[in-house]
Amino acid sequence: MPEYLTPALAYVAAALLVPFVPKGALRGLYLAIVPLAGILIFWGLTPGTYNAFNVMGMQIGLMRVDALSQLFGLAFSVAAILAALYAWHLRDTIQQIATLLYAGSAMGAVFAADLITLFVFWEGTAIASVFLIWARRTEGSFAAGMRYLIVQIGSGVILIAGIVLLYRETGSIAFTAMELGSPATWTILAAIGIKCAFPFLHNWMHDAYPSATVTGTVVLSIFTTKLAIYALLRGFPGTELLIYIGIAMALFPIVFALLENDLRRVLTYSLNSQLGFMVVGAGIGTPLAINGAAAHAVASIFYQGLLFMSVGAILFRTGTARATALGGLYRTMPLTMIFCLVGAASISALPLTSGFVSKSMILSAGGYEKMFPVWIALLAASIGAILHTGLRLPYLAFFGSDGGLRPKEAPGGMLAAMGLTAALCIAIGVMPAAFYALLPNDVPYEPYTFSHTIVQLQLVAFVALAFALAVKRGLLPKAERGIVLDTDWIYRRLLSAILGSIGRLIAGLWKGAGRMIASSLNWGAGIVYHLHGPRGPFARTWPTGAMVMVVAFLLGMTLVVTYI
């Protein structure tokens, strides 16, 4: 292949040419072809490192090709094609350029063979993606974009600090498996954890994604967090700490997703929970677990993207994604409803869908390693996913209380993208062997065993029955207007209150100090006036002899001080 030619370069070059391509169908076709060009660059290459060179004694590798990088590269490329199709109606040049740069940066990071290249593209994803939030052009989106940018750039700063420390410790910047135990590796893991939305580091996602444009949210759901999962699989496979972090990630969003009114925020909590499964797989670290985490990341790109597309289509047609304003949309948006149900079935791991064949690998990996508490925790998280996204979200959007809205069906480009994505979700579930052949480890696995299929069907049926009874008896938590705060309460309320109290204290002290200084100055001015004023003692006419005595006294004091 030509030197320095990488998929990232193809995306960047294409982004620079976007303004010169006429808007409309021709530009839409152009945006869909770019990812195909990226696939042609890396697909079919034999494993190895390409475009390697030395800079100041550091070995840089722009393109490391192996099964893991090819899998994520292929998934990102296909997702970019679907996103371009979904945004076919879009005429916003800024969003189109930002999408290409964002996708290209993610591709560059996936194929990076060294940590310096990873860092460059890591920051590229942050800078490019924020424009998908700002493109909404509202005051709220600008503020959310600024918060998002601070967090993402902060992740990059932490990453480069860890790289510097690692280079000092080992003399290498190779992007390979690392073990926790030094400041360098802990720092690098923290940087990845921010992008992966670890607990207490996750609020940027729930803040920024729902603030982006309709198409921007779909694109955001594809790249950033899945890139972080790739980095964990590449850099920290088998790190036990990730198991506990992943369990927390899988479980804590459940309550928030059940209470949230904004359906795009529901999906961000759902995405956060699904990331937990992948992090657990990375932490278990066996070949089957790594395969499961990688497979679930790819499956999630499509079924989570399909759900974001469905809600985005609703937002595009109705102007709102709030559950309290929706309901009854199956009447006028039946195709969007069907595609949403396919995504809901996939995230619920219903047999013959992508979620079933990917999630089962992680559960089985935990079971094979006799991690029963881990298996139970992930099973509980699976129940939560069925409840809050598999059932509640489609019910509130398309059925439930009729909001009286009668919008038109989604545009043709959106329907085509949703249809193809739904077909992929089903194809992966129906033909798992072809999907498993793309995974990094050659580990035989059969998802459609009798016991596993029956158990999953029973689980879905039980949760569906419980949901139906809860709806009938009015026990389902109602979607209500307002903001559901989780750990962002710390900076939205607690930190705001603390800073407000400190500000009021400082203002009070400043005001008191000002009053005291003013009072002291007035007092001093009064004394001066009393002494030197028209009636003061120093304003009187003094006899010559008195003045001679004063001068003599001052002279005597001067002599005493001088000689002492």
Image (cartoon, helix red, strand yellow):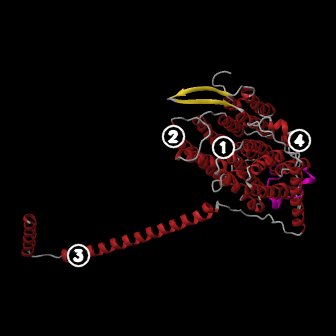
Disc nearest the viewer among 3 and 2:
2
The kind of residue on which mark 4 rests is: Val
Disc nearest the viewer among 1 and 3:
1
Bounds of the magenta segment? 315-333
Which numbered dot is residue 164? Answer: 2
Q: Residues within 10 Å of mark 3 (few under 14, many from 20)?
A: some
**Among the two numbered marks 2 and 4 on one chain, the one whose residue lies closer to the N terminus:** 2
**Residue beneath the point at 76% across and 33% down:** 31
Q: Nearer the viewer, residue 530 or 387?
A: 387
Q: Nearer the viewer, residue 433 or 372?
A: 372
On whether residue 560 falls in the magenta region, the answer is no
Residue 325 falls in which quadrant of the image? bottom right
Real-space Cα distance between discs 1 and 4? 29 Å
The kind of residue on which mark 1 rests is: Pro
Label 2: element kind: helix
Which numbered dot is residue 220? Answer: none
Q: Is residue 256 visible?
A: yes
Name the residue carrying label 4: 430
Name the residue carrying label 1: 237
User: Where is 505 relative to 290, above or below?
Assistant: below
**Among the two numbered marks 2 and 1 on one chain, the one whose residue lies closer to the N terminus:** 2
On whether residue 322 falls in the magenta region, the answer is yes
